Every structure is written in C-alpha cells, then in structure tokens.
Image (spheres, grey):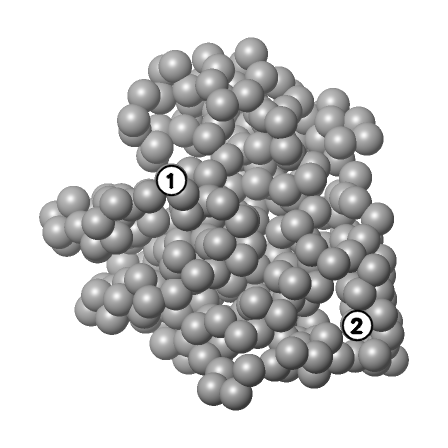
Amino acid sequence: MTPKTLIARLGTLASLPEICLRVQALADQPNATADQLAEVIRHDPALAARLLRLVNSAHFGRGAPIDDLIAAVRWCGMDALRLLALGAGMLDVFKGLPRALVDMDTYWTASVHCALLARVLAGLAPAGHPERLFAAGLLHAIGQLAMYTAAPELSQQVLNRMGSQDFLRADLETEVFGCHYAAVGAALLAHWRLPTSLVGPVGHHLAPLAAQPVFAQDAALLHIAWVVTTCVESELKQIPARAALPTIAPAIWLASGVTLEVLPQACASVDAQWFEVLEILSPGATLVF
C-alpha cells in the first residue's frame, strides 16, 4: 500500500474545512492584506478567539495586549496564521477517531511539545526558521491520524505489536502497511497543497539524512525534537537523562546546527509555553494533566 493509496481511502475526509481553505488561499495571494484576512477569520468566531489568544500568549512574548483582529493578523504573520487555521481544520477532519486507536488529547500534547521544541531549536540554529519548524512539529505525526482513519484494523495491529515502544512504530507500519506514517503525512500535506518546505521535513523527520539538501537542516531539527518529545515524561515535563535518549547520529546534529548541550535550555523554554499554547490550539487537551 502506498501513501497516496491511503490518502485516497480517506475520500472526502481528506478535505479541509472551508474556513481553513479560504485562509490558505488568501494567504497564498502576494497582495493579500491583513484587513482581508481579518474579514475571513471574523466569520469564524472560534478561530478569531484562538487567534487573539495566540498573539497574546507567551509564545509571542508580547507585553501590551492585542484586542483587534487586524492587528492580530499583522502581528501573527502569515505562517502562524496558516498554522492556526490548519490546526483548527485538523481537529475537524479527524474528530471522532476511536479512543482505542488514539487519545486525541495525548496526541495533541505530544504534537505541541514537538512543535515548540522544534521552534526553540530552530531559533538557536544558524539560519534557522522557527515558525516553519513550529508548523512542521505540529504536523509531524498527522500521518498517524490518516492511517487510523483510512485503515483502523491494520493500525490496531501495529499498536498491539508496538506496545509502549514508540520508536518501533515506523518499522511495524512499514511491515504491515508497506509505508510509515511520516510518508503518509507528507502525502497528505502535499494533497492539501501545503508548501514543500513543510512536506519535505515532515516526510523525512524519521530519517533526516535522506532529505534533500534544501530540507536537511529542518528535517534534522525536527528529528531531534521528535526524539526528545517521544522520551519526555509528560507529567513531569523533564528532559530524560542523556543515557535514556536514543542515539542521534553525529551527522544529524551537524546538519541541525545545534548541539546536545542546548537541550536543557530548549526544554525549559518549552515548559514555559507548553500548556498555554496547547490549550489555544486544542482546547481541553490540558485536562489530561
């Protein structure tokens, strides 16, 4: 089974909600104004409220509060705005998945942690792209949701064999499906016509050294964020002992532009934002704690 075959199985479920598509389409227009985007968002009160909460959160580190949608759009920027709309759309597309397959609150908790850590690491890396890495981190595991939806029985086989060893997932998925979730996620993002700057790193975050050179740094940073997120004790929000981290190849560290020594600082920064950003992007998810 190929990633495109799995996406085809989703049928209409592979389509994003109208509000999300309108935001993405308008953001693609080089002459789009903040006023135009604000007008689109104004028609979705829930999305508007989340935008205002996001720009006033610790994630953006503002002092004076923003209470105007046009100002919020200007401050947020196109990348973050696309991501906010996409996150809301993803919640709609994949709502209703059986809890036996996935606890969506736990899924979002891990995704937001990975996104924040990828963003912080990108900020520490030469020529890094923090907001792009935040988007890639939030989307890195979306292929899992697509697989749960398109082939729940095969997905259950993988989960039963995987147990608590998340690092075995891709190998088992390849054995059962013929492809792994990272490839499926990349196919879904391409189907949604998202930029290749997101598709490439998401598709290669399990094996960043195989990414095209233009995506090499982003894929490496995302890989590191994924590894650490998978290891972190969610209740304590602590980076594990170095010995507990799976080996990250020296070549991946080199490609990323950061070193192991920055992880404690990066994780501390994530801890300061994690719950607030999680509640904005996935309301109610913090109740898992």
Q: Quadrant of residue 253?
A: bottom left
The percent coordinates of residue 219 (x first, y second) are: 48, 57
| Residue at 80% in and 65% down | 42
Q: Secondary structure at mark 2?
A: helix
Q: Secondary structure at mark 1?
A: helix
| Residue at 49% in and 71% down | 57
- Residue, disc 1: 288
The percent coordinates of residue 45 (x first, y second) are: 74, 58
| Residue at 30% in and 51% down | 228
The percent coordinates of residue 134 (x first, y second) are: 51, 62
Please say whether residue 183 is visible from this viewpoint: no
Label 2 sits on what residue type?
Answer: Ala
Query: With respect to residue 103, does 21 lie above or below?
Result: below
- N-term-proximal mark, 2 vs 1: 2
Residue 125 as seen in the image, left or right of residue 189? left
Please say whether residue 19 is visible from this viewpoint: yes
40 or 223, which is in the foreground? 40
Residue 224 as seen in the image, left or right of residue 149? left
Q: Quadrant of residue 261?
A: bottom left
- Residue, disc 2: 38
Label 1 sits on what residue type?
Answer: Val
Few, some or many residues within 10 Å of mark 2 (<14, 14–19, 20+): some
Q: Quadrant of residue 160?
A: top left
